[in-house]
Amino acid sequence: MEYGLYNISDENVHTLVAQDSGAGRLASINICNAHASVGAKVRLFLSDGTNDTSIIENVVIPSGVSLFLDEALSFNTSVLALKIQIEDAAGGSTVDTNIIIK
């Protein structure tokens, strides 16, 4: 079952799984850097609205490469949301990123 397909091309924080969504049991997350030449610096984290705890922090995904996570992804959505922030690893342009959550 697909939880979500996302295309992100800015440096804003995006909510992948909202708090109180009931979708806290995830099988996998695939993060693909679709940019032709720029690395993507990724922060994937859980947030209770006040505090954030990183699952991964400052991980650089080279252009054309995917990062597949399939361990320790379950969490209590009654108190936590899953969020992501993606930046250009070189500090310049935005990075086109595709995300699949199952």
Image: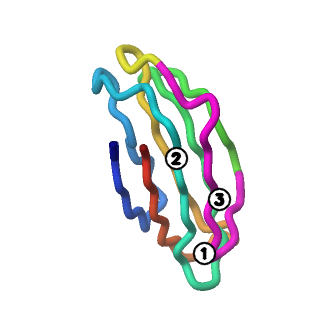
Q: Amino acid at mark 1?
A: Gly
Q: Which label's residue is closer to the chain start, 1 or 3?
A: 3
- Which residue in the protein does label 3 denote? 41
Q: Position of residue 43 (x, y in %)?
A: 60, 46
Q: Secondary structure at mark 3?
A: strand
Does residue 9 lie above or below 49 as drawn? below
What residue sits 48% from the left and 27% below the top? 47
CA gap between label 1 and label 3 equals: 12 Å
Mark 2 lies on residue: 29
Q: Amino acid at mark 2?
A: Ile
The quadrant where residue 90 appears:
bottom right
Instruction: Please name the residue that numbered disc 1 is placed on.
Output: 92
Q: Amino acid at mark 3?
A: Lys
Q: Nearer the viewer, mark 3 or mark 2?
A: 2
- Sequence-wise first label, 1 or 2: 2
**What residue do we see at 45% from left, 20% from top?**
48
Marks 3 and 2, the one that precedes in the sequence? 2
Identify the element where label 1 is drawn.
Answer: loop
Span of residues in magenta: 59-75
Residue farthest toward the bottom in the current orientation of the protein: 36
